[in-house]
Image: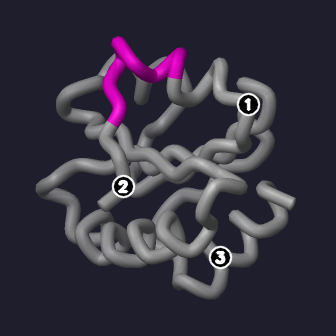
Amino acid sequence: MSEVVSGASFDTKVIQSKLPVVVDFYAAWCGPCRQMAPIFDQVSQEVGATCTLVKVNIDDDRDLAIKYGVSSIPTLLFFKNGTVVAKETGFISKDVLSEKVAALCK
């Protein structure tokens, strides 16, 4: 399962990370988020040490969602060197996610 980060650990795990990071902004009550969760976890396991995939629960960390302009979920933000370089909103397939993660983490 992907690690859930909070406001307290976000800077360390995402912004200061030497590796590219994909952040899944989600909520437990969100149907598309629940569909996306196993796909996100599978891709997280497949990328190994080349990239980090983490999750942020918007109900627990509303400030992070506001800071990054997350207005609907699921939203995936792709970070490189602490900067958002890409964004995907809504459910995406495993193939699409794998392709985007591979491009980020190469």
50, 55: nearer the viewer:
50
Kind of residue at disc 2 = Ser
84, 40: nearer the viewer:
40
Give the mark, 1 or 3, whose residue is nearer the N terminus. 1
| Residue tagged 1 | 18
State yes or no: discs 3 and 2 in contact (Cβ < 8 Å).
Answer: no
Above or below 29: residue 92: below
Distance CA(mark 3)–CA(mark 2): 15 Å
Q: Please state the horizontal and vertical placement of residue 16, each as a whole percent of the image.
A: 65, 19
Most frequent secondary structure within the magenta stretch: helix
Q: Give the quadrant of the C terminus.
A: bottom right
Give the mark, 3 or 2, whose residue is nearer the N terminus. 2
Give me the disc on residue 98.
3
The single residue placed furthest to the left in the displayed view is 29
Give me the disc on residue 96.
none
Which quadrant of the view contains residue 47?
A: bottom right
Above or below 103: residue 10: above
Q: Which residues are magenta?
A: 5-12
Asked if residue 52 lies left or right of residue 41, the reply is right
Distance CA(mark 1)–CA(mark 3): 20 Å
